[in-house]
Image: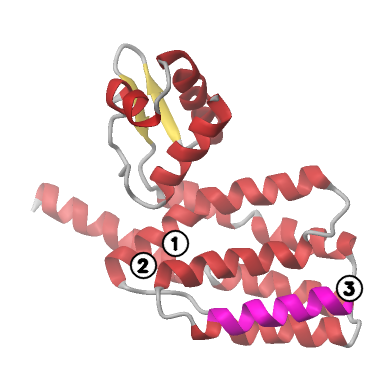
Amino acid sequence: MSEAAAEVVRAMIVDGRLAGGERINEVRLSGELGLSRTPLREALSGLVAEGALIARPRLGFFVAPLSLNEFEQLYDIRPLLDPEALRLAGVPDAKSLARLERLDHQIATAHLGEHAITLDDEWHFALIEACPNKVLLELIASIMRRTRRYELALMRETEHVHRANAEHARIMAALRARDLDGACAALKRNMQSGKVPIVAWLKARDVARKVGKWG
C-alpha cells in the first residue's frame, strides 16, 4: 500500500499537482487515496529519501523546491550512467531497433509537450533495458523521475520542449552499423544537450525571484 501511495504522490509532484515548496496535507491526501495515515507516512518518508520531499520537524512534509544545484548534480549523472548501460546491453536486435524507430517517429510527430517528454523517456529506457545490471537501470529510472519534473516545469512556464530526434538518429545510425562505442558516445552527447535550456531557465527564474524580492 505504501509503495502504491508513493507512486501516486510521486506522479503528483512530477506533473505539478503538488508544487515545489507546497506542504503536504496528510489528512486530505489520505482521504483522496483511501489510505490510513500509517502507509501514507511510510510512502512520504520514502519520497524524502528520494529527494522529492523534505521533512520538517513538527511541520510535516513539503515538496522539495526546484533547485539549480540539485538539477545540475542530477543531470550530470545520466551522461555517465546511460552510455555504460548501453555498453552492457550491447547492440539491440532487429526487433528492438524497430521499436526504437517507431518511438522516435512518435516523438517527431507529437504535438503535446508532456506527451513528447514521456515518449522521449520511453525511448531512452527502451534503448538500455537489455542491460543486465538491474541496479544500474533502477538508478537511471530514479534520476529520470527526479529530472522529469524540471523538464515539465520548463515546458509549462516557457512552452519549450527539447526535441532530440537528430541526436537519436546518430545513435541509431551507429547501432545499425554495430558501432557500439560510437553509439555510446552519441548517447552521452545527447544526454548532455538537454541540460542547457533548463539551466538557463532556472538561472533566469532565480534572478527574477531575487529582483521581485529585493527590487
**What is the crowding at mark 3: few (fewer than 14 residues within 10 Å), some, or many (at least 20)?**
many
Identify the residue at horizontal 81%, vertical 73% (top origin): 96
Is 31 rendered above or below residue 195? above
- Which mark sits nearer the N-terminus, 2 or 3? 3
Spatial distance from mark 2 to mark 3, Cα to Cα? 33 Å
38 is within the stretch colored magenta = no
| Residue 193 vertical placement versus 169 (above, below) | above
Identify the mark nearer the N-term, 1 or 3: 3
Q: Nearer the viewer, residue 194 or 165?
A: 165
Residue on which disc 1 sits: 151
Q: Quadrant of residue 101?
A: bottom right
Label 1, label 3: how far apart the Cα atoms are: 29 Å
- Residue 214 drawn at (x, y percent): 11, 48
* Residue in view at x 40 percent, y 44 percent: 13
Which of the pair 146/215 is nearer the observer?
Answer: 146
Indicate whether 190 appears above or below 67: below
Question: Residue 104's mark?
Answer: none
Residue at 70% x, 69% y: name it: 188
Please give the label number shown on residue 155: 2
Can you tell which mark lies on residue 91? Answer: 3
Amino acid type of the residue that numbered disc 3 sits on in the rendered structure: Val
Q: Which picture quadrant has residue 180?
A: bottom right
Residue 135 position in % (x across, y down)? 78, 42
Magenta-colored span: 93-107
Label 1 to label 2, Cα distance in Å? Answer: 6 Å
